[in-house]
């Protein structure tokens, strides 16, 4: 019988640690530096590579984290974006709303799971409402994700009756035409119902304003006359009209409402199918309309599959379009930066065809980690693409990647209990912080524009 050599556990662990620091860590740093050099171009600000271990202590007075690069929290205008007509128009509408309490400012924000949860975007919506409290604004475009058996916005509740099936733009083989929501829900039931309840203070665990609406536009397959959309409460005073060209049934009410219950009644054959593509909640009066459109797992190409995106986006009439799509693109094993840029070009072409006067704002990917906790270096390549697109299309960039702290900063967000263990997503506190940071950058850009305009007019 051969003698067996038993290596103590502590000695084995020591050798593994030494191997990591002597071989693996230097190689990873070399790869990152090589990729950074390869991606350098004049239009992209360099990533701050200063490496340090933050204290991770939250200052009680200012609530600031020392790993967040607050000095980078601003909008970067590329090309002629700052003096372009779309941004000038957008800031002028903000100015009219702020100082004259008149007009509407419509923002549409596209993304993936960061946006579908509507905590980040919901915080921006809340801060915009507080920025001009005299103007209620409107809730904007929504989709009841509960029908699709998925998570949705926490600031409205959904009740429904009937059997519904989900169709998402992330499914390549789904042939159902999908609109701007990136998702649709279908039913064959003879009588299905849907109730939307906008919630304010007292429902959520953080302050949120109460929204109301005086008009509801229901986007659906209006070309199929097998279903009728009706109000469940027939005693409620209202007017109903159908816009077949635009693809929606609308209801107008005499007084602002917080909730509505709709019935979908089958009047055709058994083969008829009702397809719900979303609802637009509008209100008379001034204010912001912030529509958050996100699908879990969505890539840029996912939105290219939305056949009715341009048709329905035109109805939202956005003044600013925010793109924060890309994290899921870079998580793939075979990420191709060139293809990523081509897909974005196609999406921009589609959007600009129906919203040529809308200002464009790109959000760089949040830092994220691989399953092995190694940094996702594709994030750097995607960041390069977005800056190049902004330069070409006279757009602005909010560099979330840099604001977070750069490469590997996600680990600090985890340690500060702002991010989840999945190495990609933030928790409620983290998304709320993102909303505050984004709002601050947006308002700073507006204030800078106003100061420059004032100085110009004074000359």
Image (cartoon, grey):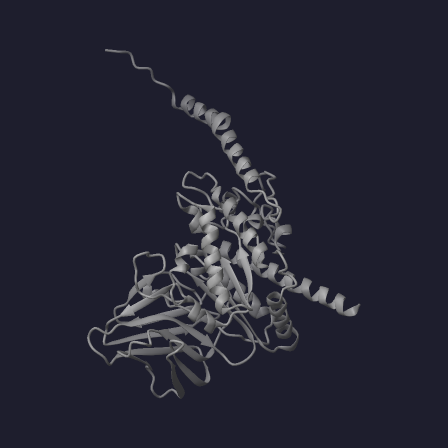
| Residue 433 visible to an observer of this rendering | no
Task: Choose top left, top right, bottom left or bottom right for residue 218.
Answer: bottom left
Q: How many marks?
A: 0
Residue at (43%, 57%) from the top-left corner? 112
- Along the viewing direction, whichever of 103 and 233 lies nearer the viewer: 103
Q: Residue furthest right?
A: 459
- Along the viewing direction, whichever of 64 and 366 lies nearer the viewer: 366
- Along the viewing direction, whichever of 23 and 7 lies nearer the viewer: 23
| Residue 384 visible to an observer of this rendering | yes
Q: Is residue 279 above or below residue 326?
A: below
Task: Choose top left, top right, bottom left or bottom right for residue 288.
Answer: bottom right
Q: In this view, does 221 lie above or below 417?
A: below
Q: In this view, does 285 lie to the left or right of 303?
A: right
Q: Position of residue 101 (x, y in %)?
A: 62, 77
Q: Position of residue 275 (x, y in %)?
A: 31, 71
- Along the viewing direction, whichever of 276 and 415 lies nearer the viewer: 276
Q: Position of residue 37 (x, y in %)?
A: 57, 38
Q: In which quarter of the image is the N terminus?
A: top left
Q: In which quarter of the image is the C terminus?
A: bottom right
Residue at (48%, 62%) from the top-left corner? 349
Q: Is residue 30 left or right of residue 246?
A: right
Q: Where is residue 190 in the image (x, y as percent from the top left)?
A: 23, 76
Residue at (52%, 64%) from the top-left corner? 321
């Amino acid at each position: 019988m051969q003698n067996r050599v038993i290596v103590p556990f502590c000695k084995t662990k020591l050798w593994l640690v030494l191997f990591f620091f002597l071989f693996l860590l230097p190689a990873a740093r070399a790869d990152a530096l090589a990729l950074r050099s390869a991606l350098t171009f004049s239009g992209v600000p360099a990533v701050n590579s200063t490496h340090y271990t933050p204290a991770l202590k939250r200052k009680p007075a200012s609530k600031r984290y020392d790993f967040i690069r607050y000095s980078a929290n601003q909008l970067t205008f590329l090309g002629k974006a700052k003096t372009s007509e779309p941004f000038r128009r957008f800031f002028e509408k903000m100015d009219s709303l702020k100082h004259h309490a008149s007009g509407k400012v419509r923002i549409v924000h596209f993304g993936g799971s960061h946006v579908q949860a509507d905590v980040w975007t919901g915080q921006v919506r809340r801060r915009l409402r507080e920025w001009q409290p005299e103007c209620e604004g409107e809730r904007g475009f929504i989709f009841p994700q509960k029908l699709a058996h998925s998570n949705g916005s926490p600031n409205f509740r959904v009740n429904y009756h009937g059997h519904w099936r989900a169709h998402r733009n992330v499914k390549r083989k789904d042939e159902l035409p999908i609109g701007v929501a990136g998702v649709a829900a279908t039913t064959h039931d003879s009588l299905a119902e849907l109730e939307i309840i906008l919630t304010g203070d007292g429902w959520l665990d953080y302050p949120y304003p109460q929204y109301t609406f005086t008009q509801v536009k229901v986007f659906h397959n209006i070309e199929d006359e097998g279903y009728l959309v009706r109000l469940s409460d027939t005693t409620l005073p209202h007017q109903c009209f159908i816009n077949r060209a635009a693809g929606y049934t609308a209801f107008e009410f005499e007084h602002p409402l917080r909730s509505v219950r709709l019935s979908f009644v089958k009047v055709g054959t058994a083969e008829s199918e009702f397809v719900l593509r979303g609802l637009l909640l509008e209100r008379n009066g001034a204010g912001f309309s912030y529509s958050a459109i996100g699908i879990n797992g969505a890539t840029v190409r996912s939105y290219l599959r939305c056949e009715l995106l341009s048709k329905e986006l035109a109805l939202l009439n956005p003044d600013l379009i925010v793109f924060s799509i890309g994290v899921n693109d870079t998580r793939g094993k075979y990420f191709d930066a060139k293809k990523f840029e081509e897909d974005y070009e196609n999406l921009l072409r589609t959007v600009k065809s129906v919203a040529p006067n809308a200002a464009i704002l790109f959000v760089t990917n949040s830092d994220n980690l691989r399953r092995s906790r190694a940094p996702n270096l594709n994030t750097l390549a995607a960041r390069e693409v977005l800056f190049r697109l902004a330069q070409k299309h006279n757009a602005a960039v909010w560099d979330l990647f840099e604001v977070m702290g750069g490469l590997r900063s996600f680990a600090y967000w985890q340690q500060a209990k702002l991010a989840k263990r999945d190495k990609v997503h933030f928790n409620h506190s983290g998304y709320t912080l993102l909303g505050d940071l984004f709002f601050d950058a947006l308002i700073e850009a507006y204030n800078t524009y106003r100061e420059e305009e004032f100085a110009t007019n004074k000359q």
